[in-house]
């Protein structure tokens, strides 16, 4: 599992190369995200273009990141959700509290 992060237009863009976020890897992903420098200093875009599946453990990773950023007066934007993830964010109502974008370009605007 590899996590890439880069600064683009005053955003910290985080991209995961793992196809699944689930109980077997969610703690490693959460810890890796928390170790990223600038995480608390920048608004974050979580690019999920490589994620095919997410279970409740994956949702917990996203919520943890969201809470961390909000507590530091920062914003989380999420982009590139596939149909499964769109439905998951809809069912859990996370799409009502988090900003969801179709593409990275849209999230950067």
Image (spheres, rainbow, N blue to C red):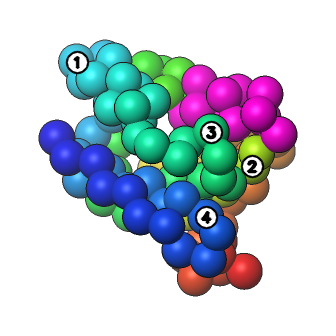
Classed neighbour count for the residue bearing mark 2: other residues with Cα under 10 Å, few (<14), some (14–19), many (≥20)? some
Q: Quadrant of residue 29?
A: top left
Kindly check if marks 4 and 3 are in contact, taking CB atoms under 8 A apart as contact: no
Per the image, the residue denoted by label 3 is: 40
Closer-to-camera residue (33/103): 33
Question: Between tags 2 and 1, which lies in front?
Answer: 2
Residue at x 66% of width, y 28% of height: 68
Q: CA distance from mark 2 to mark 1?
A: 27 Å
Q: Position of residue 62 (x, y in %)?
A: 55, 34
Secondary structure that dominates the magenta span: helix
Q: Position of residue 84 (x, y in %)?
A: 46, 50
**Residue range of the region highlighted in magenta in the rendering:** 62-73
Classed neighbour count for the residue bearing mark 1: other residues with Cα under 10 Å, few (<14), some (14–19), many (≥20)? few
Residue at x 83% of width, y 40% of height: 73
Dot placed on the residue nearer the N-terminal end, 2 or 1: 1
Residue at the farthest left position:
1
Q: CA distance from mark 3 to mark 1?
A: 26 Å
Question: Between tags 3 and 1, which lies in front?
Answer: 3
Closer-to-camera residue (37/80): 37
Per the image, the residue denoted by label 1 is: 24
Per the image, the residue denoted by label 2 is: 75
Dot placed on the residue nearer the N-terminal end, 3 or 1: 1
Q: CA distance from mark 3 to mark 2?
A: 10 Å
In this image, 79 relative to 28: left or right? Answer: right
Kindly check if marks 3 and 1 are in contact, taking CB atoms under 8 A apart as contact: no
Residue at x 69% of width, y 36% of height: 69
């Amino acid at each position: 599992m590899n996590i890439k992060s880069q600064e683009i237009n005053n955003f910290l863009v985080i991209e995961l190369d793992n196809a699944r976020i689930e109980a077997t890897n969610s703690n490693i992903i959460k810890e890796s995200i928390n170790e990223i420098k600038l995480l608390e200093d920048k608004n974050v875009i979580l690019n999920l273009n490589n994620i095919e599946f997410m279970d409740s453990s994956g949702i917990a990773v996203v919520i943890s990141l969201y809470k961390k950023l909000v507590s530091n007066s920062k914003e989380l934007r999420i982009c590139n959700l596939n149909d499964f993830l769109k439905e998951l964010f809809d069912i859990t109502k996370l799409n009502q509290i988090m900003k969801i974008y179709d593409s990275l370009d849209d999230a950067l605007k």
